[in-house]
Amino acid sequence: MNIRICVLTCLTLLSFQCAGAPFRFADVDDKSLGLWEGTRPVLVYNHGVISKADVAADRARSSYIHPIYGLDGEVLTDDFPKDHFHHRGLFWSWPHVKVGDKQTDLWMLKGIRHEFGRWLSRDAGEKSAVLGVQNGWFIGERKVVDEQVWLRVLPATAEGQALDVELVWIPIDEPLTLRGAPDKSYGGLTLRFAPHKGKPVITTSEGVTPKDLTVTRLPWADLSAQFDGANAMSGATIFVDPAHPDYPPEWLTRHYGVLCVGWPGVEEQTFQPGEPIRCRYRVWIHRGVPDSAKLKSVEADYKKQIEGAPPLSAQTLKAKLESDRVTVNIDGELFTEYLFRDDEKYPFFYPVNGPRTGRSVTEKRLENYPHHSSLFFGCDYVNDGNYWQEGLERGRIVSKSVKVLRDSGHEIAFEQHSVWERPGAEAPFDDIRKIRVSAPSRDLRYIDFEIKLTARIKVRIKKTNHSLFTARMAPELAVVNGGQLRIANGDANEKGTFGQTSPWADYRGMHHGETEGVAILCHPSSRWFPAPWFTRDYGLMSPTPLYWLENGFVEFEPGETIELQYRVLVHAGNPGAREIQSEFESWAR
């Protein structure tokens, strides 16, 4: 590791004059990936297991950041310090990690370890560099926790450079319990600083702190020192995202060179399988010794930047409007097409590709149900017209115009105006749809579907199971083929869900070697919320009240509107009910 640091440091001869140059990633060796801004090294992410000749083999660790460089090329972090061999640059671990009933120690690497999985992103340009990494926590050969690490580095300025860190952990099969060290609270995101001259200055939101702190709640803390080989003082601050669990969290600081965000602290917290744990931070690398007022100003800027901003894991989308479809790509790969051809019964989405397999989790035109078209909206028995089953002469939802409102970025959006038409009959409805698509992570996509139906004449809809928003799943995901269907109260499959009201339903199963699925969430502002669900084990789910009408029909006067909102989650992995409920609650606010 020392040889690699020397090689990287040699590239700092031009140092800060290269600020503003494009970022680039390059392998340092087969275990480490470096990031440069121009010719100035910024950091190294160690994805392989790093060991040291004179240190016990059980202190070898992967998945941490070292070195982190200051603005003038000085090394800010330490690796294998003699007083604590397990301190490794910028790292994240806990001394008390319980998986199910098994107690382990990720801090001292007893019974559990990190293991690199795959790169999710290695995007570098002039405005930023983003690194995404999929890791796992392993007990023996068993993966017990999915981990995603997201890093974003912004261009250096004369004052400093921002390194944003986003960490996501998801327990897989058993509950995960985390706890910091008793009386000290260490365990969590930890920054071990490099050797230095004299006593460092530690500054918090309360001012300069001459004493070490334990179990102290703070929004941020800074350590500045004259590091070995440097001619002046420099340092780094860790700012905690206000959306962080238990904000502000407990901290531990040490003047020998440690800042530790001690979350969850001395009190243990347990997370259920599929329940995500998300933590975001900013590490601000700077010259000199900024005072508390300056750091509060930097904190305020950070808060402004992250308020309402998508997570670092959010992907880039692009929408293309053609004469009969809107095509949506995510990071250059097809996610879905919204089809409205002249020979179709109604507009619908197909394919709806799974995040991992890239193959559609929905299906259309199956032999027994040719009128099921993937993800769609329609209705039968509307003034004796049929806007659901095959036969265009029985009724069609005809697209009149489509306008793309946002064609690229972290979200795309478009709007469609349609009319429900039938030969020889007056049109019952005007149909306005607003559709937004986003991808907040590599394993999750959103389709937000808002529809407003306005009655053009008096409309009567008779009792029907063929109605409203519907998903027809790919055969592999159907209950009859080993899939699973659940609603919010935990009831499962057609027997437990048919006719039950619920704010959401989720269909999932093994899909070409991966667990993928679809959840439909219904917004509380929608008419008939919460609607009963029409479900089938062969692979269909639809939130609709129209099969359970008390009088056998429902009527709408001219000008009356029906407004409905849905969010479709297209997911990979195995998100639990708590996670889907959390998605619903966050969206429904």
Image (cartoon, helix red, strand yellow):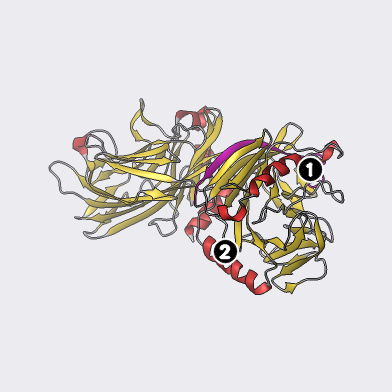
Magenta extent = 101-126
Residue ID for mark 2: 302
Q: Is residue 24 above or below residue 127?
A: above
Q: Percent from the top left, x then y, of residue 41? A: 63, 47
Give how far across and how far down residue 406 sits, in percent: 35, 52
Front residue (pair 176, 58): 58
Magenta residue check for 28: no
Q: Tag 1 or tag 2, which sits nearer the N-term?
A: 1
Instruction: Give the left or right position of residue 427, taking residue 109 as reference.
Output: left
Q: Nearer the viewer, residue 359 or 479?
A: 359
Q: Residues within 10 Å of mark 1 (few under 14, many from 20)?
A: few
Res. 231 in view: yes
Residue that numbered label 1 is attached to: 101
Q: Nearer the viewer, residue 523 or 417?
A: 417
The amino acid type found where label 1 is placed reads Asp
- Give the amino acid type for the residue marked by disc 2 in the picture: Tyr
- The answer to whether 560 appears left or right of 288 in the picture is left
On screen, residue 166 above or below 138: below
Q: Quadrant of residue 536?
A: top left
- Identify the disc placed on residue 29: none
Name the residue at the top extreme. 367
Q: Count the labels in the image.
A: 2
| Residue occupying the point 50% across, 29% down | 480
At label 2, counting other C-alpha atoms closer than 10 Å, the crowd grade (few under 14, some 14-19, many 20 or more) is some
Q: Position of residue 65 (x, y in %)?
A: 69, 47
Screen quadrant of the N terminus? top right
> Is 268 rendered above or below residue 300?
above
Magenta stretch holds residue 103: yes
Viewer can see residue 488: no
Indicate whether 393 appears above or below 188: above
